[in-house]
Every structure is written in structure tokens, then in C-alpha cells.
Amino acid sequence: MARYSKNTTKTQTRESTPPSLIAYHVAEGRKEGDKGFWTRIGAAWEHKDGAGLTLQIDLVPVNGGRIVLRVPADEKAEAQTQGEAN
């Protein structure tokens, strides 16, 4: 009779770590002096060895503009910072 051992393979679990940076798409204002419109489109996590980042983009902008990576902040401070960055 063959003996079967219990499945001892461990399932890898990904620890939930907050992102190092938040990715935003910034669409320029239509007129000179208009503020840009910021949309959160993803996040970036620093590699364990510190030699790079993993970027996860949930939305790819197709109409130009720019992608900005910023350090995460609380929502209130983040809204104020975005207004000043334009």
C-alpha cells in the first residue's frame, strides 16, 4: 500500500504593503493659467533590494498630459498639494 504524505507545499501569500508612490495622470487646463486635472491611475512599490520600482497602472491615459509619481499622503493634504503643483 502506498503512503501519501500530506501536502506540505506552502501557498505563497503576498503581504499587503502600502505603495511607495501614487501615479496620477495630469491633464493640462484648456486655457493658459487653468489648473490641471489630476486623476489617480495607479501605484508603485519599491523593490526589496531598493534597486527599482514595480509600477501598476490601472488606467492608461490616451489624450496626452503627463504621469506624475508622488509620495502617498492623507487625502486632505494630498488635495492641497495637487492644487499647488499646477
Image (cartoon, rainbow, N blue to C red):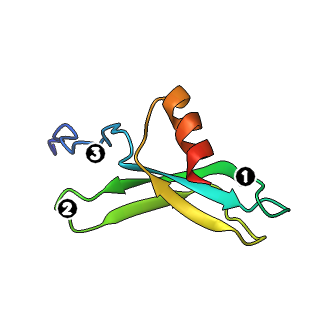
Q: Position of residue 62 (x, y in %)?
A: 75, 70
Q: Pointer 2: residues within 10 angstroms few (<14), some, or many (20+)?
A: few
Viewer-side residue, 6 vs 53: 53
- Going from N to C along the chain, the mark reached first, 1 or 3, is 3
x and y percentages locating residue 75 in the rendered image: 53, 29
**Residue with the most extreme right position:** 30
Percent across and percent down for residue 29 are 79, 59
Looking at the rendered structure, the kind of residue marked 3 is Gln
Would you name the residue on which mark 1 appears?
35
**Residue 63's mark?**
none
* Disc assigned to residue 50: 2
Amino acid carrying label 1: it is: Lys
Q: Quadrant of residue 80 in the image? A: top right
Q: Earlier in the sequence, mark 2 or mark 1?
A: 1
Compute the Cα span from label 2 to label 1. 34 Å
Q: Earlier in the sequence, mark 2 or mark 3?
A: 3
In the shown orientation, is residue 55 left or right of residue 39? left
